[in-house]
Image (tube, rainbow, N blue to C red):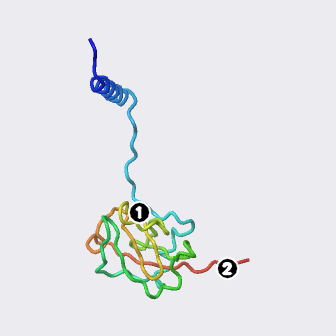
Amino acid sequence: MRQGKFGVVAGVVLAALIVGYLGGLFFPIQIPKETVVTSTTPGTADTCMKSTASAVVLKGPFKKEGSYAFVTSLPEFKQQGDTIEQKERSQLVLCEDEHAIGTPHSPHDDVRTLGRGRYSHWIDTLYFSTPDNSNPESNGHTYSVVVPPASPRG
C-alpha cells in the first residue's frame, strides 16, 4: 500500500509526540520557579538602609509601559544617568522598603516585558519594575533611589 507525503509526515509527527510524551514521563524536566530578584549589583545590599537620609522616594502617578515597566522622571539625577556613550554610568540603586532590588542597566524592553525588579536609569528617566511585577502605586511598598557614596581610593 502506498502512502502519500502527508501520511508519512503525519506518522513522523505522531511518533515524535509519543516519544516526547514518554520521555517526559520517565525524564521530567525541572522548571525552576520564578524568584523575587534582589539586587545583583555587588556591594549594594545595605546601600538603601545606610542611605535613607539621601534617598529620593518615588511618588506616582507613574507612566506604565508594556506589561511591567513604570516610568518616572528624575531630573535631579540627569547628569548621572546612562547614555548612549556611557551605557553603565549610573550608580543609582533602586530600593523597595529600604532594600536594594533588581538589575540595573537593564534593556528597556526587558523591564517592560520581563520585569522582576529590572531597571534602567536613562539620562533623567527611571524605567523600573517591581520584584513581583505588581503595581508600585498600589502594592503597599515604598520605592526609592539612592546613589551610594563614592568609596575612598587608597
Q: State the CA–CA distance, disc 2 to disc 1.
A: 34 Å
Q: Mark 1 points at which residue?
A: 110
User: Residue type at mark 1?
Assistant: Asp
Q: Is 79 placed above or below 7 here?
A: below
Placement of 103 over or under 72, stated as above or below: above
User: What residue did someone put label 2 on?
Assistant: 152
Residue 94 left/right relative to 12: right
Q: Residue at x 74, y 77 (%)?
A: 154
Give residue 95's position: percent from left, percent from top.
43, 73
Q: Residues within 10 Å of mark 2 (few under 14, many from 20)?
A: few
Residue 6 position in % (x across, y down): 28, 26
Q: Mark 2 belongs to which amino acid?
A: Pro
Q: To which quarter of the image does residue 109 belong?
A: bottom left
Marks 2,1: beta carbons within 8 A? no
Q: Earlier in the sequence, mark 2 or mark 1?
A: 1
- Depth order, front residue of 72/142: 72
Image side of residue 15 versus residue 125, left or right: left
Residue 46 location in percent, x, y?
51, 71
Closer to the camera in the image, 121 or 38: 121
22 or 130, nearer to the observer: 22
Could you classify mark 1 by the number of other residues whose Cα lies within 10 Å: few (under 14), some (14-19), or many (20 or more)?
some
